[in-house]
Structures are given as structure tokens and as C-alpha cells.
Image (tube, helix red, strand yellow):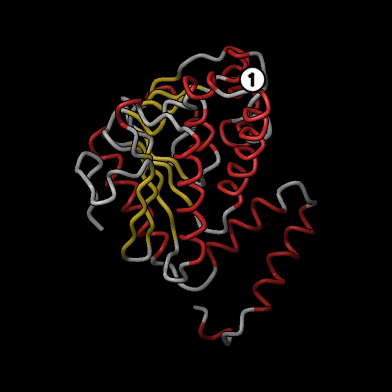
Amino acid sequence: MTINDQEPDDQESRTVVFRSADGVGVIAVNRPHVRNALDRTAQREFDAALRAAEADESLRCLVLTGAGGRALSAGWDLKELATLPPESESALLREREEWLWRWFSTPLPAVAAMRGAAHGLGAYLAVCSDLRVGGPGTRFRITGTSYGYASLTWLLPDIIGHAHATDVLFTGRVLDGTEAHRLGLFSRYVADDEILAASVALAEQVAALPGTGVRDAKHLMREHRTCALRERYDAENRLLAADPRPARDLF
């Protein structure tokens, strides 16, 4: 799959573009004029793209990116949010909570191509992905505490460790790509203009693996991470025992 995050697309009138090839689906937030900040329309088009991807049995991995090369997403569209009456705002936030959980819990492995800014909601989407690709120009910021609420306390410590997560969440500061890489946020660290290509290549590598092993690994690591070791061991072995292939064909 060859994708350029700068090129126009035949779906460019949409706020989220979805395309797929070779077992990989790419969800691209397409609001470069606002650094891919997400409004209601983009949120709903993103959710529709995710549901379409999950329904496509040919897809085995997803990539999340942002159009324009300046940002994965700069966060929520605060200008739109400021225009909403309280009841609409509350409904939208509840809708957002369910959408973000669907992204986190999708059975498809997901790679976040973190070129440029990943702030607020953009940082949330990246952290909720399974794999993250960044570069020196990546700018990562979890903004919750800057607005007076906690955000990503339930997940960030598992990725970068409790001490680093405490620093990042308590200060609300921006991490540049070099520091984010040092803290262990990224799965791959490449030149900025190679982030999308590296993300797609990583997704293709994941998609090429046989059977349901990757999906099973995602499920086991996420759903059983707080269980006792023996429970986790047994859960893995139950999936192996349920594989219909003869043992000699597994190796």
C-alpha cells in the first residue's frame, strides 16, 4: 500500500477518509486547516469508518493518520464545543466516550502514525492504539489536567511506566518526539517524513501473520492484564487448544 499524507483524495470532502489495501485499513482525519481537530461530523465519520473496517473480513490491521502532515490531531474542536447548548454538549461527550472505547477495544490491531501534533483527543487516540510511530517533530500532550480534569490515568502508566506517566499527567506539558521516544511511547522512531510509510509497513507486517494469533494476543494482553499469572497462562493455552489446525501444522 502506498499512501501519501499530503496528497488529495477522492473522498477529500469528507472529514475522515477511509481506504484499504493488502489487509490494511487506513483511517485519516481530514481537517488539515484546523490541524485535524475533531468536530461532531469527524467523530461520527471516524466511528463509521471503524465499524466498516471491523465488518471487512479482509482487513487485519488499521493505521490512524492525519491529513496535511502537521498533526495526527490537535484535539477536540473547541470552537464547535463552545457553540453547543449544555444538553447537546453532554450528549456529545457521552457519545465521544463510547466512540473512544470502541477505538481502544476494536479487535483489529491499530497503529497510530504520530506525525506532528497529537494533543488532547489526538493524544488519547494515539495512546489507545496498540502501536505508535513517531519522529523528532512529534509533539505529544495530554491536556486534561490543563482544563481541570484527569485523563488517561487508566492507560498511560501501562505504556510509559508509573513515574513517567505521573510527570506527564501532573504537568500537562508537551513532549517532543525525542523525549517521547526516550520514555517508551513509540513502537518505532523514524524521520518525520517517513512516519506514515513506516506505520503502513508495520501494519502490513502485522497483517501478514497467519490465523488469529495477533487478535488473540491483543485480547489476552488487554482483557487479562490484571489477572493472576496462572489465569493468564491458562487463558492463552485455552485459545491454543481451540485452534482447529493439527499441532504439526502450527510450526
Task: Please provide percent x and percent y for residue 91.
Answer: 66, 35
The residue at the far left in this view is: 7
Task: Please provide percent x and percent y for residue 54.
Answer: 51, 62
Badge 1 amino acid: Thr
Residue located 30% across and 31% down the image: 32
Q: To which residue does mark 1 refer?
A: 166
| Residue 37 found in image quarter | top left
Residue 104 falls left or right of residue 208: right
Identify which residue, 121 or 158, lies in the foreground: 121
| Residue 14 found in image quarter | top left
Residue 55 falls left or right of residue 6: right
Q: Secondary structure at mark 1?
A: helix
Task: Please provide percent x and percent y for residue 151.
Answer: 64, 26
Q: Is residue 225 above or below residue 56?
A: above
Task: Please provide percent x and percent y for residue 60.
Answer: 45, 64
Residue located 79% across and 58% down the image: 230
Mark 1, Cα crowd under 10 Å, few <14 / some 14-19 / many 20+, is: some
Q: Is residue 124 above or below residue 174?
A: below
Identify which residue, 41 or 26, lies in the foreground: 41
Residue located 73% across and 61% down the image: 233
**Which part of the image, by quadrant, shows the N terminus?**
bottom left
Identify which residue, 44 or 175, lies in the foreground: 44
Q: How many marks?
A: 1
